[in-house]
Amino acid sequence: MDPIRNPYAPGAGQRPPELAGRDQELAAFDVVLERVARGRPERSLILTGLRGVGKTVLLNALRSAAVRRHWGTGKLEARPDQPLRRPLSSALHQAVRELGHPQSESVDHVLGVVKAFAERSAAPDAKLRDRWHPGIDVPAVRGRADSGDIEIDLVELLSDVGGLAADLGTGVAVFIDEMQDLGPDDVSALCAACHEISQSGLPVIVVGAGLPHLPAVLAASKSYSERLFRYQRIDRLAREAADRALAAPAKEEDASYDDEALAAMYAATGGYPYFIQAYGKAVWDVAPRAPITAADVAVAAPEAEAELAVGFFGSRFERATPGEREYLRAMADAAVASTASDDDLDAGWDMGGGSVPTAAVAAALGKKPQSLSPARDALLKKGLIYSGERGRIAFTVPHFGKYLLNQG
């Protein structure tokens, strides 16, 4: 097969040639956009799922849908070491520009509020060299969104931006990737602002994406968050959608898979979109001709696994310290001990659907659970594991347990 015509795209956040299995989410978001633009009440949206299920890709697709409806949009990626003000200011600056409001005076006023909000990221007595100056070429509006209280300021900021969109009969959508990495104060302020904006009927929504424990992060911040957001779990693809993700791009290049090859690909990838693209690329490059067969999949599997071991699993494993790696391996051992067979491991826990007790991990290491708290907390902060419920933990990366077991 011609490698130049290889249609698959196993990149981080890179849109696959066929966005299969997400039609329902896209259609539901179109309804949200239309309802909000018409002044109808609607909740903001939270996407949750493991690494590799295509949350970022879907987030970008939803943003594109908003842009096509002439909404103002902005996107940011949360980081544990960065407060919300600066990245949110940049996102809303872009959203205001996308709106294309015809009254320059109104636009300048809102941009001045965005600038005031951004500049408040530094202390009032900070030296000029320590202040961050966003690329907004209008004077900051004093006395608006610059109190220093992030909750008050965020409500005022989103109110002004939402008012600008309401003038045009459209809306503003802020897209936040890795939302679980926001600081506690910023999460609380964002929830409060969404609550206030919703009550005011302004056309502003937040679309967040994060790991499976994101709903728990939001609930810990504000008790009403479960009613404030609409949660969508983004999971691996069903067999039909996974087949389409492989077959549709191949058809565009005058190629195909036989039925046995598609079955083998689903068995190898588990339906995870990132794995589908990685295996698809490897199989295309080794297959001598179309249709692609199960034998071609078998030949390509070691190459695909080696690529994933370096770029998907290994890059994350390298971020852990020796003590943290020991903890990760103990998680994999505890999972094996809790399942009847390797098939059970593939079908359940290691496929991303389950978790193991922290006590079982401690038992596997022969240590007390309290002594392992630093390693567990560090892995949680690094996004390598998550805790969906008290006393239990799971990998954020599907198949990570199998990778660790194969490492010996």
Image: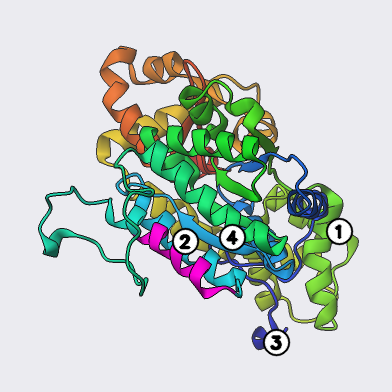
The mark that comes first in sequence, 2 or 1, is 2
Residue 290 shows in the view:
no
Which contiguous range is marked in magenta?
103-115
Q: How far apart, in angstroms, are the residues tagged by discs 3 and 1?
A: 22 Å
Q: Quadrant of residue 273?
A: bottom right
Numbered tag placed on residue 2 in the rendering: 3
The mark that comes first in sequence, 2 or 3, is 3
Q: Viewer-proximal residue, 341 or 277?
A: 277
Numbered tag placed on residue 173 in the rendering: none
* Residue 6 at x, y percent in the picture: 68, 80
Crowdedness near tag 1: few (<14), some (14–19) or many (≥20) residues, C-alpha within 10 Å? few
Q: Quadrant of residue 100?
A: bottom right
Check disc 1 and report the residue beneath it: 260
Amino acid type for the residue under numbered disc 3: Asp
Check disc 2 and report the residue beneath it: 110
Q: How far apart, in angstroms, are the residues tagged by discs 3 and 4?
A: 51 Å
Amino acid type for the residue under numbered disc 4: Leu
Q: How far apart, in angstroms, are the residues tagged by discs 4 and 2?
A: 8 Å
Q: Residue at x 53, y 31 (%)?
A: 213
The mark that comes first in sequence, 3 or 4, is 3
